[in-house]
Image (cartoon, rainbow, N blue to C red):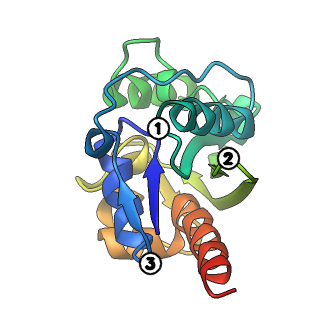
Amino acid sequence: MKVVFATNNPNKLKEIRAVLSNVEVLSLADINIDTDIPEDHETLQENAMQKAQFIFDLCKLPCFADDTGLEVDALNGRPGVFSARYAGPQCSSEDNMDLLLKEMDGCENRSAQFRTVIAFIDGKDSHYFEGHVKGGILHEKKGAQGFGYDPLFMPEGYDISFAEMSQEEKNRISHRGIAVKKFSDWLNSRTSE
């Protein structure tokens, strides 16, 4: 089975392909689509479906998209759905992490969670798959692996950040890894029927 991953993020594509090995995951470049994908809703679920629907309408192939948010307790769940553009529309991951550290300065409560929602659409059905991982925000960036907020997030039960883990280890416990595993199991059950 072939499915299109509606993302322009090469890091997400690499992570997803490593976990979702039971199907052929096509990138937007594989299907000659080079466009910005809208994501202007207020929830992860709505954004994930908006992205999947947008690309499905262009290619008419089974398609999935994800949206992920870092939800920090001391910041009332922010940056949440705005995690990728927390420091502004054209910001970098470094800008986002710097703003988060600034806003967390002096906060004793460092608890947070990453949450991912995957939306799948194939023209007949649509489905959602969710994963989350609890942890905390570090006081400084640690590690060089991963992307996004990974250098600042330490999952519960670990003494290293996501950015200090191997991709395999992170995929096993991460929010995206959990959501993709649910998606993978569901795809396997469909193809075995």
- The answer to whether any part of residue 51 appears in the image is yes
- Tag nearer the camera, 2 or 3: 2
Marks 2/3: CA–CA distance: 21 Å
Q: Is 6 drawn above or below residue 106 in the view shown?
A: below
* 174 vs 47: above or below: below
Residue at image x 55%, y 52%?
Answer: 62
- Give yes or no for contact between labels 2 and 3 (Cβ–Cβ under 8 Å): no
Disc 2 target residue? 123
Which secondary structure lies at badge 3?
A: loop
Q: Which residue is mark 3?
A: 22
Percent x, y for residue 23?
43, 71
Does 149 appear above or below 125? above
Q: Secondary structure at mark 2?
A: loop
| N-term-proximal mark, 1 vs 3 | 3
Q: Distance of mark 2 from mark 1, alpha carbons?
A: 11 Å
Residue 161, visible in the rendered structure: no
Q: Which residue is mark 1?
A: 59
In this view, the mark in front (1 or 3)? 1
Pick whichever, 78 or 101, lies toward us.
78
Instruction: Check disc 1 and give the amino acid type.
Output: Cys
Nearer-N-terminus badge (2/1): 1
Three-letter residue code for mark 2: Gly
Whether pointer 1 and pointer 3 mark residues with C-beta atoms closer than 8 Å, the reply is no
Specify the quadrant of the image occupied by residue 165: bottom left
Question: In percent of the image, x 55 and y 65: which residue is there?
Answer: 180
Residue 129 in the image: x percent, y percent?
70, 59
For the residue carrying disc 1, how many other residues have a C-alpha within 10 Å: few (<14), some (14-19), or many (20+)? some
- The earlier-in-sequence mark between 2 and 3 is 3
